[in-house]
Amino acid sequence: MFAFLTRARKALTRGGIVLAALSLAACEPMTVGGGGPRIDTNAPVPVALLVPSGSTQSGDNRLAQSLVNAAKLAISDLDGVKIDLRVYPTAGNAQQAANAATKAVDDGAKIILGPVYAAAANAAGVAAAKRGVNVLAFSNNPAIAGGNVFILGPTFSNTADRLMKYAVSQGKSRIAVVHDTTTAGKAGEAAITAAISAAGATKVADETYEFSQNGVTQAAPGIANDIKNGNAQAVFFTANTAGALPLLTQLLSENGVTSSMQQFIGLTRWDIPNSSLSMPGIQGAWFALPDPGMSQQFASRYSAAYGQPPLPVTGLAYDGIAAIGALVKSGNANALTAQALTQPSGFVGVGGIFRLLRDGTNQRGLAVAQIVNNQVQVIDSAPRSFGGAGL
């Protein structure tokens, strides 16, 4: 029932993708300049794609190929924009990523897409910064964002903000936070706490447990008591379906805390794998996800083109090419500067709208879903523009 997954590399999360028919374009052009190389918009723009091929880690070569596939699919959707895509292996290694970034810039790359893992992305960013080239990394780790490095992976902060705004709109303003004591758990708790404050809600309990089966078992009764004593209207969890969530929600239910009494909210995707949806403890719970319709369109198109479904991170490569193509299409020589990349109107990407922020992180338009009778039901649609409902 209870299994923990140990991963040496946790710097990637899920994303989605958008097709040409859905308009791969920046929402509006704006004046750009500074923080990046000038480009010749009349010639194919050299773009470096850094992928973890050559790694000894299981799955990295498949991941690398899926990223290449998605980038090529995105290029084929660009309307009148020519991209000279150049692929460089990093083996998932920081030093090789730095070497690849240096070679890519020497070869004329005007922007770097990737790498995947945080340490590799940070190293590539340092190498590229010396030459004034920006990096759109596939990481979701905000610790490496900033300067010339922009992360494309969905962040805890973005998800927590979306869910807390929705919770408050539904009258759920007294929030208990439940998290483990790992680095990821603490990072999730910090994002949720900031979101609670920003939404004008109140944190009535901050509950922790050791990341082990025994840790959850020992902590659950006390967590349940504190949630009830704090009159919490909602419980916000950092746990995921591959870790503590199944046992934690079962034990909380046995101690009188259920999603029908205190609304359960998940910081992670509770619909992956699909079998998770049948867990009794998460029926009625809320979580956030990219626009399901748009994500499914990409998944179907990718499967038709390559004979297999995309991996969860695959869409980020498509997003990066979509943003680059939209900016290049403006015809401005400064199209790949930091100012252009962070235009407030953003881009259309894998699961809807997204934009890069000046601190190197990103904001994505997410839908809010509820688990009802082992099915996912969208209860608040993903926004279609920045400044609209849900943002």
Image (spheres, grey):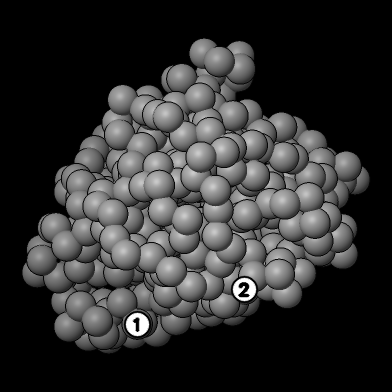
Label 2's element? Answer: helix
Task: Identify whether 84 is placed above or below 189.
Answer: above
Q: Is residue 316 visible?
A: no
Q: Is residue 41 visible?
A: yes
Position of 284 with respect to 115 (left or right) is left
Residue 39: x %, y % from top left: 55, 53
Residue 148: x %, y % from top left: 59, 71
Quarter of the image where the C terminus is located? bottom left
Judge the density around disc 2: few (<14), some (14-19), many (≥20) Cα neighbours within 10 Å.
Answer: many
- Residue at coordinates 28% horizontally, 54% vertically from top-left? 29
Task: Identify whether 167 is placed above or below 90.
Answer: below
**Amino acid tagged 1:** Ala
Position of 138 with respect to 157 (left or right) is right
Looking at the image, tell me whether mark 1 or mark 2 is earlier in sequence order: 2
Position of 176 with respect to 81 (left or right) is left
Residue nearest the observer in this picture, 329 or 384: 329
- Residue at coordinates 59% horizontally, 43% vertically from top-left? 45
Q: CA distance from mark 1 to mark 2?
A: 20 Å
Task: Identify whether 182 is placed above or below 117.
Answer: below
Residue 343 figure quarter: bottom left
Label 1's element? Answer: helix
Any mark on residue 194, and which?
Answer: 1
Q: Identify residue for label 2.
A: 144
- Residue at coordinates 49% horizontally, 64% vertically from top-left? 337
**Amino acid tagged 2:** Ile
